Amino acid sequence: MQQLHDAMTIQNMATLLGRVMSDYYADPAADAVQPFSEQETVLEMLAEVERGHQIRECEQADDPRSPEQELLQTAAPERGEGFAATMNVFEESLLGKSVKTWHPMFFNQMSAGTPAVAVLGAALATMVNATLSTFEAAPVATVVEKITARWLAKLLGMPAGSGGIFLPGGSTSNMLALAVARRRKLDPDVARIGLARATQRGAILCSEESHYSIANAAALLGIGTEQVFRVPTNERGEMRVEGLRTVLGQVTDRGLKPFALVATLGLTVTGGFDPLAELAPICREHDLHLHVDAAFGGGMALTESGRHWFAGIEHADTVTWDAHKWMYVPLTCSVLLTPRPADLKRTFRVQADYLFHQDDAGEEDLCENLGHFTPLCGRRWDALPLWFLLRTYGAGHFRGLAETRLRLTREFAELIAADPDFSLSYDPVSPVVCFRYLPERLADCPGETLDLVQRRAREAVRRRGVALFNITSFKGRRHFRFILINSLTELGHLKGVLEEIRSAGRTELRRLAEQDATYTFASVS
C-alpha cells in the first residue's frame, strides 16, 4: 500500500477533498435542502436493490454508466478507477442526492450540519485509527478522551472528579448507564450470576415522554419492557413529581424493586425538562440510581437562562450528553458521564490477557485502559473532533451560539402565537417548537381530519425541497416539530416556511372540500 501513498498522491487527494468541501460550505442555501426528485430516484434505486435487480458488471473503467448504475453494481469492482473518478461518483451520485444538513432550512433532526473544523478532526481521528481499548495502543487518544470528558462534565456543573467515556450515540450511553444502575442498586453480582438468580426483580421509572432507548435498554439488560414504569407528565411532557410518588408506590406494591429513575433534560418531542432539583431528593429517599438523559438538553447548560434546569445535576449518578447536537460534532459523539468513573470500571471490567496486560506498579492511574470502562472493545476516537472544535473556537463560541438558538426559539414561538392560522402546542423552553396549522374555521373539525391536514401539508412542503422539518404525535394528535439548533437558521427562514405551510394547508383544505361536501371550510382561498 505504501506506493499508493507518495507525497504527490496525498496532496492531490487533499486538493480534491478541499474543493468538494469548499463547494459544500460556500453557499449553504444554494441548492434545495433535499430535491424531492432526487429522493424519488434514490427510492427507485433502493427498490431495485430489494428486488435483486441485476445491473451489468462493467469491466472497463471508461464504460458509460448512469449514476444509478454506479451505485447498483452487483459485485465489488475488480479494478479500481482511482480517487478522482471515485470522488466524482461521490459528488454526483451520493453527495448530490443527500439531505443537505448544512442548510439553513434543515430543522428535521436534533443534529444539523457540522463545521469544517470538526470534519477535519474526524478525518484525522480516522487517519490515526486508534482503538481506545488499551492505553498501550492509544496513549494520546486515551488522554484526550479523558480530558475532553472532564471538560464536558465541568460545563454541565458536575462535581470535581467527574469523568466518562465516549460512546456511539445517546441510546448506547443510556443503556450502559442503566447497566451501571443495575449493578449498583439491584444486585452487585448480577454480571456474574445473571438476573435469573438476582435477589430482586427490578423496575425502571421514567416519564411518559422519555426516549425509546430506555425501553430498549430494559429489554437488552434483561429487566423487561413491562418493568419500565411511565410517570404522568404535564402539558409539555415533563414528569410530574406527585405522579412519581404515586408510581413508586404502585411498583413496590407489585413486589418489584425500583432501582433507577431516568430524568430527561431536553425531551425528544417537546424539548421540555423534567424537574431534576425536585427529583434528586426522591431518588435519595428511595435509594434510586439517578440517570440524567441530557442527550439533547445538555446544550442548555451553555446558556444563562437555561442553567437553572441543571440544579441538582450534582446528585446525578450518570449523565448522557450528545455533543453531536448543540456542539455540532459529526455523528456520533455521545459521552456517558459520572461523578464516580470507577463505577464504569466495576460494571464492565472483564479480564482478557491477550488485550489487557498487568499494569506496572504505581502506573495504574496513568496507564488506565479505557476498555475496562465499557463493554465495547474497538472504539473510534470520537473525542477528537470535539477537542478540535473546543480548542479552535472555545467554549464561549458555543455559549454564544446556544444563546442565539434560544432567542430564535422565543421569536418563532411568538410569531406562531400571534398568527391566527397556527396554534402553538406548548410554551417551548428549549429549541424544539411544536405547532399546528389550525385556522379558527377548523376548530370543530374531527381530530383525524386535522391530523391529515398536518401530514399532507408537511409532505407538500417536503416535496418542493424548500425545507425539511419533522412531524410528531403528541398528546394523541399530529404536530409539526421544528428543532432550531441549526446555527445557520434565522427568523426570516422560518417566516418563509410558515408561508409555505399556510399555502399547502389551504390547498389541502380545498382538496378535502372537493372530495367531501360535508367539509365546507369557508374562506380557504
Image (spheres, helix red, strand yellow):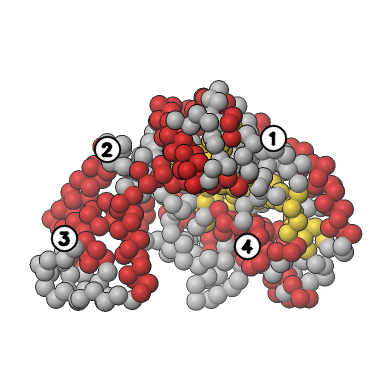
Q: Are marks 1 and 4 in contact (CB under 8 Å)?
A: no
Query: Foreground residue, 222 or 375?
Result: 222
Q: Residue at 69%, 35% (x, y): give it.
A: 311
Query: Foreground residue, 414 or 198?
Result: 414
Please name the amino acid that badge 1 sits on.
Answer: Ala
Q: Is residue 110 visible?
A: no
Using the numbered discs, state the Cα–Cα distance from disc 1 to disc 3 in whole angstroms: 54 Å
Question: Which of the numbered marks, if any, corresponds to residue 440?
Answer: none
Using the numbered discs, state the Cα–Cα distance from disc 1 to disc 2 in whole angstroms: 43 Å
Using the numbered discs, state the Cα–Cα distance from disc 1 to disc 4 in whole angstroms: 28 Å
Question: Which of the numbered marks, if any, corresponds to residue 311?
Answer: 1
Question: Which of the numbered marks, if any, corresponds to residue 216?
Answer: 4
Q: Residue at 30%, 58% (x, y): give it.
A: 41
Using the numbered discs, state the Cα–Cα distance from disc 2 to disc 4 in whole angstroms: 40 Å
Q: Are marks 1 and 3 in contact (CB under 8 Å)?
A: no
Q: Are marks 1 and 2 in contact (CB under 8 Å)?
A: no
Q: Which residue is mark 3?
A: 85
Which mark's residue is nearer the viewer, 2 or 3? 2
| Element marked by disc 3 | helix
Question: Which of the numbered marks, if any, corresponds to residue 30?
Answer: 2
